[in-house]
Image (spheres, rainbow, N blue to C red):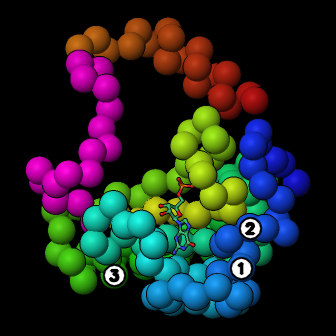
């Protein structure tokens, strides 16, 4: 199992406790592998989370079969949030590791309805489109990732 710095052990994992029903959650749906429930500190009304019931820290250690299942159910959850709130769009976010902003060390995918001008800001840095990256840099980085 992969742990990131400052991440807690499964024994005190809040999402494991939710998965086992040891602490309450507002459930949207569940099956043998995963569950979707409302985020307790929503950045927007409708903000919910999809988690595997088994403990995985994040994408670094999740079982490929489990993440495939999560992907199918994520599409379903995203469509449901879209149908329920009719927002301008729906954001899916996964933070992998403390450095990416992950606070709860149990894999979870945020599903957040978004509206133009809403207060929740998730945006790329200003002016990031000023300069297109040189093709040779993109090719080199693509190779680096592909071969890692
Ligand atoms: P992260 O920053 O790790 O990507 O997001 C963790 C999310 O879990 C946060 O949005 C936070 O509000 C949510 N959260 C933390 N504790 C609980 C809890 O006990 N119940 C629920 N439903 N959500 C939680
Ligand atoms: Zn856990």
Residue at mark 1 = 17
Disc 1 packing (10 Å; few <14; some 14–19; many ≥20): some
Q: Quadrant of residue 15?
A: bottom right
- Residue 4 is left or right of residue 69, and the answer is right
Instruction: State if disc 2 and disc 3 touch (CB < 8 Å).
Output: no
Task: Say whether residue 125 is magenta.
Answer: yes
Asked if disc 1 is less than 8 Å from ligand 2, the answer is yes
Range of residues picked out in magenta: 113-129
Disc 2 packing (10 Å; few <14; some 14–19; many ≥20): some
Looking at the image, is 28 positioned above or below residue 133? below
Per the image, label 3 sits on a secondary structure element best described as helix
Instruction: State if disc 1 and disc 2 touch (CB < 8 Å).
Output: yes
Tell me which label, 3 or 2, sits earlier in the chain: 2
Residue at mark 3 = 80
Task: Pick whichever, 63 or 14, lies toward us.
Answer: 14
Instruction: State if disc 3 and disc 1 touch (CB < 8 Å).
Output: no
State the residue at coordinates (67%, 22%). 144
Q: Quadrant of the C terminus?
A: top right
Q: Is residue 64 visible?
A: no
Secondary structure predominantly adopted by residues drawn in magenta = loop
Tell me which label, 1 or 3, sits earlier in the chain: 1
Residue at mark 2 = 13
Disc 1 versus disc 3: nearer the observer: 1
């Amino acid at each position: 199992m992969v742990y990131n710095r400052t991440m807690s052990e499964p024994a005190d994992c809040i999402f494991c406790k939710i998965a086992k029903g040891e602490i309450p959650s507002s459930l949207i749906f569940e099956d043998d592998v995963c569950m979707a429930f409302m985020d307790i500190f929503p950045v927007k009304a409708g903000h919910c989370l999809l988690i595997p019931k088994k403990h995985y820290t994040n994408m670094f250690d999740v079982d490929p079969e489990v993440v495939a299942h999560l992907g199918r159910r994520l599409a379903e959850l995203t469509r449901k949030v879209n149908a329920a709130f009719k927002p301008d769009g729906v954001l899916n976010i996964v933070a992998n590791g403390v450095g990416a902003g992950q606070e709860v060390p149990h894999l979870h995918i945020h599903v957040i309805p978004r509206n133009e001008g809403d207060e929740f800001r998730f945006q790329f840095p200003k002016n990031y489109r000023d300069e297109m990256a040189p093709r040779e840099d993109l090719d080199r980085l693509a190779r680096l990732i592909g071969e890692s």
